[in-house]
Amino acid sequence: MRYLIYIIFPLIFWSCEQTVYDNPDYQLVFSEEFRGESIDESVWNFEIGTGCQYGANLDGWGNFENQYYLSENASIVDNEYLQIEAKEDTVYFTHCNGSFQTREYTSARLNTKNKFDFIYGKIEASIKTDLRQGIWHAFWMLPSFPTVSWPYSGELDILELSYRDQNVFYAGTLHHSGAPIGESYDYSNNTSYFDDFHLYTLEWDRASIKWYVDDVLVNTITRSSNATLDNNWPFDKEFHLILNSAVGGTLGGSPSFDGQPQYMMVDYVKVYQKIID
């Protein structure tokens, strides 16, 4: 039945303009709790490789990342949660330019493009992460059917956790035609934070975007408060969900795993949308 929900509800609610309603209720339109023995490929796509096959400018996934993505680095553990494993693991492959290359790390990246695409809502995930120099965990969104190139097409980062140069940061950021807008939070003095699952939430509508950690509001970006953003707002289109753990790159820095795999564990992902009573 849940797959019927995926198909029907977006048709009803994607047209909703949330900010015009007074105190509307949220309706659950997507729920993935990672029960079962394997990842549901009717919901999730695996992205494989170094990114070059998705565009010449995406080699290293556009961020100079060090990993090679493989589907086998993502699995369901104990019928309870998704586990993405980033590890030292040499891969030999033929690059898009025809050259023979290697990568010293592997990980996984999943998305819902063309399987669950939506506009506006409350998006949340319960996630627990390991953290070591060079890891870059992310729960984020890209437009499903962009008509212009990135970053003009937009990007919404719900969670980015990285450990670089002995500093730990969480960032909630949006990308658009101007400079990225967001906040970073330093967890380097609270490493026990990573012992547990935490709830990461984004509320997205026509007027603003809000980020929450464990139901605490940590950042708000209002469209009307930024002229560049208001005049080039790319967030009134369908987006899709992405989960991945990158290695290295612009936020990860130089990796140093010392043979220890790093994990991102996802208990659930849910999307709600507002409706009229």
Image (cartoon, rainbow, N blue to C red):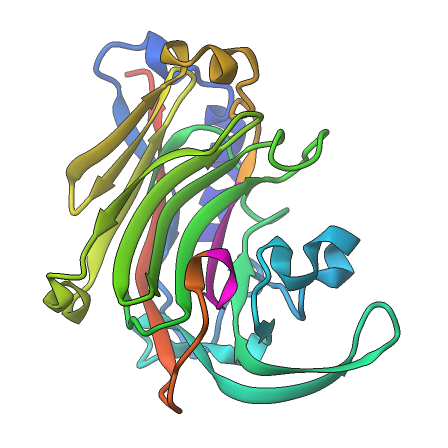
Camera sees residue 262: yes
Is 90 left, or right, of 216 in this rendering? Answer: right
Q: Residue at x 35, y 35 (%)?
A: 182
Give the residue furthest to the right: 98
Q: Residue at x 39, y 22 (%)?
A: 205
Q: Quadrant of residue 232?
A: top right
- Location of the C terminus by quadrant is top left
Which residues are drawn in magenta?
240-250
Q: Nearer the viewer, residue 203 or 153?
A: 153
Q: Residue at x 33, y 76 (%)?
A: 79
Image position, residue 109 (x, y; %): 53, 64
Image position, residue 267 (x, y; %): 29, 63
Count of residue discs: 0
Image position, residue 62 (x, y; %): 63, 54
Q: Quadrant of residue 190?
A: bottom left
Q: Quadrant of residue 276?
A: top left
Camera sees residue 127: no
Give the residue furthest to the front: 165
Q: Nearer the viewer, residue 162 or 264?
A: 162
**Magenta-colored stretch includes residue 129:** no
Image position, residue 266 (x, y; %): 33, 64
Please name the predominant secondary structure of the magenta segment in the image: strand
Q: Nearer the viewer, residue 122 or 52?
A: 52
Q: Residue at x 44, y 34 (%)?
A: 174
Q: Is residue 159 above or below residue 48?
A: above
Q: Nearer the viewer, residue 17 or 221?
A: 221
